[in-house]
Image: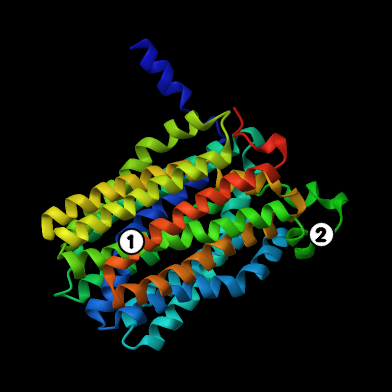
Amino acid sequence: MSALGAYLRSLDPRLPRSVWILNGGGLANAVGNGIAYPFVAIYLHEVRDFSLPTTGLVLAVIGGAGLLAGPLIGIVVDRIGGRATLAGALVLMAAGFGSFPLIREPWHAVLATTVAGVGNAGFWPSQSALLAGLAPQARRHGAFALQRVTRNLGIGLGGLVGGLIATTADPTSFTILFLVDAASFLVFVVVLPLVPEPEVSREGAAAGPGGYVEVLRHRVFVGIVALNVVFVAAGYAQFELLPLFAKTEAGVSELGIGVIFFINTAVIVLAQLPLAKLLEGRRRMKALGAMTVLWAGAWLVVLAGGAWLDTLAAATVFALAAILFGLGECFQGPVQGALVADLAPPHLRGRYMAVSTNSWDLGFLLGPALGGFVLGAEPLALWPLAAAACLAAGGLALTLERSLPRELRLTPA
C-alpha cells in the first residue's frame, strides 16, 4: 500500500494554483462541449437533412474560419494578453454554437460555424499561452497533460448526458444540447478573473518586436506544426466523423455513441497522468510515433467493425477503437503543446501558439471535408486511408527529431 501511495503521489503534476483554476474553468466548459460535440454531424445530416459531403464541408468551416482569423489572434494575445483574448473567444463560441438550433439551410450552418470558428481560433492560442506562462518550464508537459485530462473528463461526462438527451425523432432534444454547450462557455468566462495574466510582454520587451516572419523562419517549429496538420486530419478529424459512420453504416444508437465517447475520454482521464510521468526523460518524437501506431490500429478496428458487425456488436468494437485512439492521445498530450511552448520566445508566444492552433484548424478543415466525401462515396475506404496517413506522419516525426535542439528532445524529468 505504501508503494501504491508513493506512486499516486508521484503523479501529482506539481503545478501552481492558477493552472488548476484555469483547468477547472476548462472542465466546466468541456462538459458542455461533450454534451453537443458527438452529435453535431448527426444533427446536420439526420435532423436538417444535409448530405454527407455538405455535412463534412460545414464542419470544415470551423477550421477555415480559424485559419483566416488565427494570425490576427496571435498578435492580439501578444499585445493584450491571453486572459482577455480567451474571454472574447469564449463569448464568440457561445454565440456560434448557441445559434445551431436556428439552422435550417446550409448557409445558416456556415454562418454559425464561422462565428464558432473565429472563437475557436482565439480559444486555443490564448489558453495555451496562459498555461505556458503560468507553469514553470520544467512542468509545462504536466500542465498540458492536466489540460488534456480535465478536458476529456468533461467531454466524456457530457457525452453520456448528451446520449441520453439526443434523439433524431425529436429535433428539440438537439436544441437543449446546443444551449447547454453555449452556457458552458459563459461559465468559463466567469472563472477567468481568478486567473492572473503572466508577464509575457515584459519578458520579451528587450527582445525586439519580432513578428510572423521570425516565427516562420523557425524551420523546426514549422516542421512540428506541419506534422500536426496530418495528425489532426487523419486522427482527430476522423474521430469526429466516427459517430456519423457508426449510426449510418452500423446502426449504432445515439446512446451507444455517447458511451463510445465516454469510454474514449475515460481512458484519457485514467491514463494521461501515468503516461505523462512515464514519458519524463524519454524522447518526445518517439512518443508521437507511438501515437500514430495506436491511431492506425484504431482505424483498422473501425474498418473491421463497420464491415462485419452492426448495432450492439459494432458499438462494442468501436469502443475498442476509441480506447486505442484515447491511448494515442495520451502520448501527444504532454508533448505537442509543451514542445511548442519551449520553442517559442516569450515575446512571440501568442504568435507561436496561433500558428500551432492554425495547424489544428487546417487539419480540421481538410479532415472532415475529405472524410465526408470518402464516406459518401465508399464509407469503408476511409479507415485504411486514415491509418496509412497516420503511420506516414509517425515516420516523419522520427525523422524530424534530428533537427530538434538537443536539450528539447526529451520530456523534462
**Mark 2, other Cα within 10 Å: few <14 / some 14–19 / many ≥20:** few
Residue 29 falls left or right of residue 51: right
Under mark 2, the amino acid is Gly
Give the residue number, with chain letter if any, for mark 1: 383
Asked if residue 51 can be seen in this view, the reply is yes
Residue wearing tag 2? 210
On the image, the x and y values in percent for residue 234 come to 43, 60
Mark 1, Cα crowd under 10 Å, few <14 / some 14-19 / many 20+, is many
Residue 348: x %, y % from top left:
74, 55
Q: Residue at x 75, y 49 (%)?
A: 345
At 62% from the left edge and 68% from the top edge, which residue is drawn? 70
The numbered mark at residue 107 is none
Residue 20: x and y, percent? 50, 40
Q: Residue at x 42, y 46 (%)?
A: 293
Instruction: Compare marks 2 and 1 and give the one earlier in the sequence.
Output: 2
Please tell me which residue is depicted at 30% across the width and 45% down the height of the picture: 323
Image location of residue 35, percent across then percent down: 30, 60
Q: Is residue 79 left or right of residue 123?
A: right
The front one of 71 and 192 is: 71
